[in-house]
Structures are given as structure tokens and as C-alpha cells.
Image (spheres, rainbow, N blue to C red):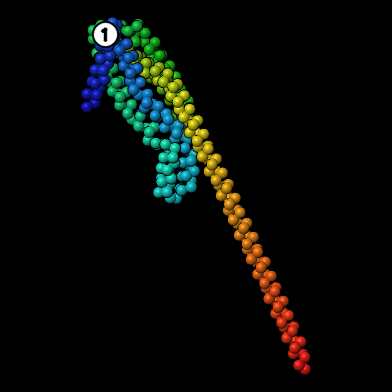
Amino acid sequence: MWNSFVGVLASLIQAMYELTRLMGYANYGLAIIFFTTALRILMFPLSLSQAKSSRQMALVQPKIAKLQQQYKNNRDILNREMQTLYRKHNVNPVAGCLPMLIQMPVLFALFGALREFEYVGEGASFLWMTNLSEPDPTGIVLPIIVGISSYLQSKLAMSNQPQMGEQAKSMNMMMLYVMPIMIGWTTRRFASGLAIYWSTFNILGFVMQIGINSIVQKEQETMQAKMDAEESKEEQEKIEQMKKEEESRRIKEENRKRGTDKKKAKNKKNIATKEKSGSRGSELDFDNY
């Protein structure tokens, strides 16, 4: 099944080559660029969805941490409240992983297709490369382009990522600087056609990431403003509730004091009445003598 998938991608590259032939310039290098551009355009919605999900999860993370602390002893309530929070802000926790799961098999299959691709007939050469099935004859130009484009794309993508811990930052820094060097170095032994694909994929990814960052930034600001407004409203409601509770306590205290004062007044009246009655009774008794 995997070999069939790789074969399909190879056929698509060949179809792009036939398109260049119809354009009057039959060339496999140009066919690879066309194919990579089409692939990037198709993957753009997935990349955008992944970036949006990552940012949304970062924005609701403080609320999730608060819920985890509040309901740390009740897992069922915690899960229910988290689901309510996700629905309220239209956040899908798995949306960030799904695009990557879809893209990776395609990228690996394309890697295999280009590594074993047979460039037959005219158009097997491109620019300074005499045969795209062989490594870059200069041994340095394409590897440098691949390394630099990988770095630029990664750096721009990381600029859109949420704040993270020190350990995650260290790992990202290593990935940012070490991986492009490793990829560029490895490209020296790859077929030139594969290096062209890799360079084009990275350069287009860099350009599209600019658009993705712009879209995500605007949506982030909108979502943050909405969350701030909701928090302000909730805080105001808490203040109003506290005022009502304080007013209720004040009224109850006043009523209690009134009741106490009335009871004291009644008791004083009863005592005075009893004293008066007792005094009058004594006078009557004295009169009898």
C-alpha cells in the first residue's frame, strides 16, 4: 500500500513534467517546483488550522490551570468544566495534532518518490545541475539553500508559538539551529531533484507562514478581547453579588438588632408592669391592717 502511494506521487510529478512540456519548456526541475507549490497550497488550510489551534490552546491555558486547581480532587467535574470551556471558546484540543498527522505521511512518501525518481528524456538537467538524479555538482549551493530556508521557516513558525517552559525553549533553540545544519549537510548526498523540492517547500512555507502569522494574530487579538470582556463581566458580577450579599447581611443584622431592641423594650415593660403590680399589691395589703 505504501509503495502504491509513493507511486501515485511519482505519477503526479510526471504529470507536472508533461505540463511543462505543453508549456514549451520540458523540465523536471520546473515540474518539481510546480508540484511542490500545488502541495503547499493544498496544505495551507491544515497549517493554518494547526497554528490557530496552538494559539487558542495557549490562550485558554490559564483558565485550564485554574480549573485543574479548583477541581483537582474531582476528575469528572474537571473534565466536564474543561469541555464547557472548549465549547465556549470554540477550541478543539486535537486540532493541532491532526494536520501534522495528515501531512507527515504525504511528506515521507514524497521524499521516497523523489529519492528514487527516474529522470528520463529531456529536461533532466536544471540550472547548473546536469542531472537531477545526482547530488548537486558544486556540493555546497543546494545544501546551503536548504539549510538557510529550513532555518528561516522554523524561526518564523516558532515566533507564532505560545510561551513555554525553559526546557521546551532549550529544545526549540536546538531544533532551530541544529536541525537546519543537519538537513543541509545531509542534502549533499541527496539527488538534486529532492534538494530542489526541499528548498521550494521551505521557501514557500516561509512565505505562507507570514500570512498564517498575520491571520492568527488578528484572531488571537479578537479572542483575547472577548476573553477579557468576559472576565471583566464575571468580575463585575462577582462584585455585584458581593454587594448584594453584604446588603443582605446588613439588613439581617439591622432586623436582628431591631428584634433584640424590641425584645429588650418588651422585657423592660413587663418588668416595670410587674414591679408596679407588685408595689400596688403591697399597698393594698397594708391598708387591710
In this orientation, which residue lies closer to the viewer: 278 or 114? 278
The picture quadrant where one finds residue 210 is top left
Quadrant in the picture for the C terminus: bottom right
Secondary structure of the residue carrying numbered label 1: helix
Q: Residue 288, percent across and down?
A: 76, 93
Q: Does residue 225 sit above or below 82 in this rendering?
A: above
Q: Does residue 88 sit above or below 161 in this rendering?
A: below
Q: Residue 34, percent across and down?
A: 32, 14
State left or right for residue 112 relative to residue 147: left
Q: Residue at x 58, y 53 (%)?
A: 245
Residue bearing mark 1: 22
Quadrant in the picture for the N terminus: top left
Q: Residue 140, percent across and down?
A: 39, 11
State left or right for residue 261 relative to residue 155: right
The picture quadrant where one finds residue 274 is bottom right
Q: Residue at x 64, y 66 (%)?
A: 259
State left or right for residue 251 relative to residue 12: right
- The outermost residue toward the bottom is 289
Q: Can residue 181 be seen in the rendering of this structure?
A: no
Q: Can residue 225 be seen in the rendering of this structure?
A: yes
- Amino acid beneath label 1: Leu
The picture quadrant where one finds residue 28 is top left
Q: Does residue 59 sit above or below 121 in this rendering?
A: below
